[in-house]
Amino acid sequence: MLLMALAPPITAFIGWITLGEQLSNKSWFGMILTIAGIALVVLKREDHHLTSGTVKKMKFSYPVWGILLGLGGAIGQAGGLVLSKYAMKGYNAFASAQIRVIAGIAGFMVLFTLFGYWKNAYRSLSNTKAMFQLSLGAFFGPFLGVSFSLLSVQLTSTGIASTIMALVPVLIIPASVLLFREKVNIKEIIGAMLAVGGVALFFI
């Protein structure tokens, strides 16, 4: 979710490249601050012992594939938000969310067919507990979350809506600790706040 905080700066960056939208010095600083906050969390320094002595090198704190996929999610979110605002205009936000879900189902059907996941999908339907929890998550996420985000984009600017939605990395910290018993250190908290601060600065 912290990597998803890159979505608003990426959105503005796409607009700068494709639409010729201007970025102020404050916007560039906000982008740098967001990247710095994320780098604080995903990077760490480790000692490497060489024959000539010990040197410190930067290393990812988490698997590289996970970070790259999170970055891909941020790029997808940014592109989807811009395209949704352009296509939606005065159209109903909940109907727009439904269209996005239908398009997502179609995409997953193609992937399931290509990679042979249908058997696993049918097997998962028998797990009633997991299906209930997933359905509850889908209600709050893809239904309410996406619908409200599209409504926000419709009623405000894309930048303001993206900034508010970028609060998720900070809001998710208590849930991570209370529900999943994850250990969140002070560096991760500071990094999340820096990233969100950078996003806020980007659009204030």
Image (cartoon, rainbow, N blue to C red):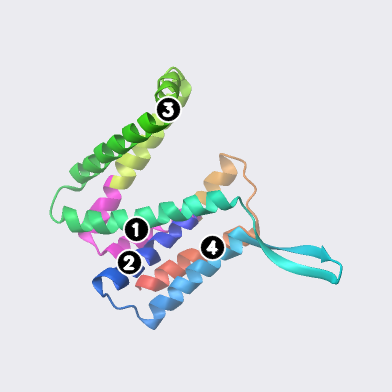
Callout 1: SS: helix
Rounded to the nearest angstrom, the CA distance separating label 4 from label 2 is 20 Å
Q: Which of marks 1 and 4 is nearer the N terminus?
A: 4
Residue that carries the numbered disc 2 in the rendered image: 14
Q: Which residue is drawn at 38% across and 31% down?
A: 112
Query: The disc labelled 3 sits on which kind of residue?
Result: Tyr
* Side of 18 where 92 appears, left or right: left
Residue that carries the numbered disc 3 in the rendered image: 117
Crowdedness of circle 4 by 10 Å Cα count: few (<14), some, many (20+)? Answer: many
Residue 66 higher or lower than 167, as above or below: above
Are the residues flagged by discs 1 and 2 in contact, CB closer than 8 Å? yes
Residue that carries the numbered disc 4 in the rendered image: 38
Rounded to the nearest angstrom, the CA distance separating label 1 from label 2 is 8 Å
Q: Is residue 40 visible?
A: yes
Query: The disc labelled 2 sits on which kind of residue?
Result: Ile
**Rendering quarter of residue 113:** top left
Q: Which residue is drawn at 21% across and 41% down?
A: 99
Tell which tag, 1 or 2, sits nearer the viewer.
2
Callout 3: SS: loop
Q: Which mark is residue 78?
A: 1
Q: Earlier in the sequence, mark 1 or mark 2?
A: 2
Residue 144 higher or lower than 43, as above or below: above
